[in-house]
Image (cartoon, rainbow, N blue to C red):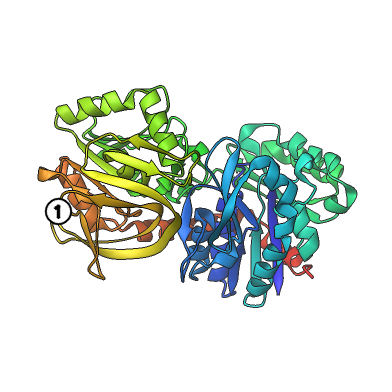
Amino acid sequence: MAAIMLQGTGSDVGKSVLVAGLCRLFANRGLRVLPFKPQNMSNNAAVAAGGGEIGRAQALQALACRVPPNVDMNPVLIKPQSDVGAQIVVHGKVRGQQRAGDYQARKGELLEDVLASYARLRADADLVIVEGAGSPAEINLRRGDIANMGFARAAGVPVVLVGDIDRGGVIASIVGTKAVIDAEDAAMIHGFLINKFRGDVRLFDDGYREIERRTDWRGLGVIPWLPMARRLPAEDAVVLDHRTAGGGAVIIAVPMLSRIANFDDFDPLAAEPGVRLVMVPPGTPLPAEAALVILPGTKATIADLAFFRAQGWDVDLAGHVRRGGRVLGICGGYQMLGERIADPDGIEGRAETVAGLGLLPVETVLTGDKRVTEVAGVSLADGLPFAGYEIHSGRTTASADAALLRFDNGTEDGLASPGGQIAGCYVHGLFNRPEQRAAWLARIGAASDGVDQAHRVDAALDELAEALARHVDTEQLMKIARMAR
């Protein structure tokens, strides 16, 4: 069995995408490959096979390996609920809430859980490709670390360091990482990759050699900017900043809530040629010309409802509705559209009940139990199929009988107003199936390209693997991976 870990000089250097591409590359070569990330921090989660939730990136990496996602691939998931606190998910299940300082002090206690998951994957794979979190250069977080060098040394997994040249200073970031980490950690690193290069790679030859000279680490390749990565679901909300996708005439607007979750729901819409998807940043009004406004999922519904109002988006939304514009709420966004949201047990913070936006006759009570499951069925308006998943806390009850969706087991979800102008449901991934997406677009005057989102993502993974095969020294990478204990 072989294993290798990609760590980064910082966050958002492209580790998740590179791991996904390498997973597909080696899977295409006939290896049984499995992904692993000891600790992830994200509100973009996915449902694992058999239940439980993991980070969206590990679900994508499992897809790249052509295996079902399971909770061992991401044993610790941290879901931020506030600036100082988060929900801690271990092996797919909520283990509790912790303030950031408390988690940092106690995270080492989870190393046993992490190593148990890794051992199970290792026993079932020819190659495990591990993704680090943040950077090993964050030496203030090294004590009790389970995400980077703490895991690598405990599990005996060799490391390759990834630097992002697009943000500048890549020589200093790689050389500086070796300068600040301790010698035993540095000894775990056996090579480096330069990611997101634009232009003539020969201009970096001297810099590449200088990194090798100053670190004694072997360069494993310079990876160009990979445009196909834009077709893959992103995990980090940093990619949404001021993001507008597509040049179509029909505008769909999504307000960027402070705890936005599962925003890859909108990737299929961003790919549509007739659509312009506008992710509306805080402090910016919802575009008056939008045909559809979608309230996305959130990890903290009550807090983000207050955030929504603080931006003046409630006033914008009321005007949108008066003009005849359509509204869809997904998960937390669905809860916001109702008349009341109650949190009697303080699940998200202090115990309270708040007024919703009052656009649908539903009420929500937040509860400690979480529904985490894959779902499929048909929309009741037209009988068209959908497939997706639910990850949410709380029960929503309606005072009207106009459900939006019917699951295969006969239960119903969501609500639509008479005429369907306002609608909401708990289902993520609603637009992935082409039939369902085409129906939603037809209601706002846009045609669909008819592409299944799963096929789009799978094709992008193959393109990514082919690009990495051209630019990464995969033979040396496998030699390093075979050094794993």
Whether residue 280 can be seen here: no
Q: Nearer the viewer, residue 301 or 111?
A: 301
Query: What residue is rendered at 40% in x and 24% in y?
Result: 310
**Relative to 3, is 151 above or below?**
above
Residue 91 appears in which quarter of the rendering? bottom right
Q: Nearer the viewer, residue 242 or 363?
A: 363
Query: What residue is rendered at 30% in x and 27% in y?
Result: 314
The residue at the far right in this view is 183
Q: Nearer the viewer, residue 80 or 211?
A: 80
Residue 78 locus on image (x, y percent): 58, 50
The residue carrying pointer 1 sits among few (fewer than 14), some (14 to 19) or many (20 or more) residues within 10 Å by Cα, namely few
Q: Amino acid at mark 1?
A: Asp
Residue 208 appears in which quarter of the rendering? top right
In which quadrant is the N terminus drawn? bottom right
Whether residue 1 can be seen here: yes
Query: What residue is rendered at 86% in x and 54% in y?
Result: 187
In which quadrant is the C terminus drawn? bottom right
Residue 191 locus on image (x, y percent): 76, 53
Q: Mark 1 highlights which residue?
A: 401
Residue 301 locus on image (x, y percent): 41, 41
